[in-house]
Amino acid sequence: MTSSDPTAVPDPWHALRELLAAMDAEIEQVYVERGIEGVRPRFAYPLIRLAHTGPLTIRELARSLDRSHSAVSQTVAALRREGLVTSEPGPDARTRRIDLTERGRSLVPFLEAEWRATHATVAELDSEVPYAMTAVVEEVWRALERRSMRQRVLHHLVEPPQ
């Protein structure tokens, strides 16, 4: 143990996590106001994709969404609990094909409209702030391409003596 608790100083990620959580909560409130219960904003992307592609394995869905298998697997489990997707045996014993239920399919037109409205909202926010969020994210990615997060952490890492 070191002499001082490093978690006592403010977490530099806290504000970003709080912002994203607050925006998701606001989008979820739009769903609730429309009588759509049990649907989270993170469900929109896979539900819309499945509506356009038809059944996919979790691996195929993860690849098409550019998300990790683990993250999509967790989302699919939540979608299944809410009765939005079904899971059937896939082409081999290790895979499952995910498809929309009637409830899931019925939500897609609204989710597509919300998706477009959210994108318009992000563009609106970008125009209102001095540094567009989308531009800042792109700049951070470029900086990390020049020197990775791992390299940066290692540069600052001072390991305790053993």
Image (spheres, rainbow, N blue to C red):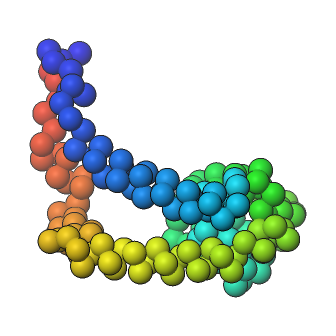
103 lies above or below 151:
below
Residue 85 in view (yes/no) = yes
Q: Which quarter of the picture shows residue 108?
A: bottom right
**Residue 101 point in image, percent of width and height:** 84, 68
109 lies above or below 71:
below
Residue at (12, 43) in percent of width and height: 156
47 lies above or below 151:
below
Residue at (64, 52) in percent of width and height: 74
Q: Which quarter of the picture shows residue 88?
A: bottom right
**Residue 136 point in image, percent of width and height:** 22, 70
On screen, residue 119 versus residue 95, left or right, reads left
Q: Which quarter of the picture shows residue 46?
A: bottom right
**Residue 75 point in image, percent of width and height:** 64, 56
On screen, residue 4 versus residue 27, left or right, reads left
Q: Quadrant of the C terminus?
A: top left
Residue 42 in view (yes/no) = no
Residue nearer the viewer, 103 or 77: 103
Residue at (17, 63) in percent of width and height: 147
Q: For the image shown, how many numbered marks are present on the structure?
A: 0
**Residue 17 point in image, percent of width and height:** 36, 49
Residue nearer the viewer, 55 or 13: 13
Q: Quadrant of the N terminus?
A: top left
- Looking at this rendering, what residue extends furthest in the front direction? 33
Residue at (59, 71) in percent of width and height: 45
Residue nearer the viewer, 61 or 122: 122
